[in-house]
């Protein structure tokens, strides 16, 4: 393999997705996603470091983000990191680095109010849901370790 450009981020949206449309009527969603690292420092005190990531989704994925995600939603995003150059109002060159979302998965539990609602009735399961077989509860617990 000669190279790989792939970012995977799980975080919470800092604001509702912002959706615009190109001249050719293609949806473009811009999302701000926070990831937080928690650790204990040398003194044993809990420290927190939050990083903000700019995520851009295109087409149908942008529309899905707009429809189902909102501020505070927990989601997984995957795609390449890209840097774009643009000019501001004063003609100055500016650069922005972002993750171009090719995949997104909503991670909020249903009914938590975090944007994971998909409009399905309560007896339907969202795509990608795995059922847990709890028939193992009846097994003996006489394991040798």
Image (spheres, rainbow, N blue to C red):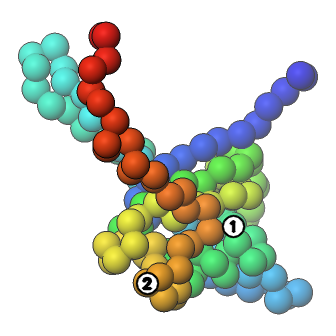
Q: Nearer the viewer, mark 2 or mark 1?
A: 2
Quarter of the image for the N terminus: give it: top right
Q: Is residue 51 visible?
A: yes
Which of 116/38 is in front? 116
Residue 5 x, y percent position in the rendering: 76, 37
Name the residue at 71% across, 49% down: 79
Q: Is residue 110 left or right of residue 141?
A: right
Q: Which of disc 1 and disc 2 is earlier in sequence?
A: 1
Q: Which mark is residue 86?
A: none
**In this figure, which residue is indicated by the disc labeled 1?**
57
**Is residue 90 visible from the viewing direction of this image?**
no
Mark pair 2, 1: CA separation: 29 Å
Residue plotted at (34% across, 36% down): 139
When asked about the image quadrant of residue 126, the answer is: bottom right
Q: Is residue 106 above or below residue 119?
A: above
Farthest residue toward the top? 144
Residue 42, percent across and down?
16, 14
Say above or below: 101 vs 145: below
Q: Residue at x 88, y 87 (%)?
A: 24
SS state under label 1: strand
Marker disc for residue 122? 2
Residue 30 falls left or right of residue 42:
right
From the top left corner, tell me how far across and down residue 2 is, in percent: 90, 22
Percent position of residue 83, x then y: 73, 48
């Amino acid at each position: 393999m000669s190279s790989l450009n792939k970012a995977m981020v799980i975080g919470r949206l800092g604001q509702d997705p912002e959706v615009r449309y190109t001249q050719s009527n293609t949806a473009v969603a811009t999302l701000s996603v926070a990831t937080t690292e928690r650790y204990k420092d040398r003194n044993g005190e809990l420290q927190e470091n939050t990083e903000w990531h700019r995520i851009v989704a295109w087409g149908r994925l942008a529309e899905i983000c707009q429809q189902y995600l909102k501020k505070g939603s927990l989601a997984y995003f995957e795609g390449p990191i890209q840097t774009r150059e643009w000019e501001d109002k004063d003609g100055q060159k500016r650069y922005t680095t972002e993750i171009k979302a090719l995949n997104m998965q909503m991670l909020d539990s249903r009914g938590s109010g975090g944007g994971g609602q998909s409009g399905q009735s309560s007896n339907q399961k969202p795509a990608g849901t795995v059922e847990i077989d709890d028939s193992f509860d009846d097994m003996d617990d006489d394991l040798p370790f």
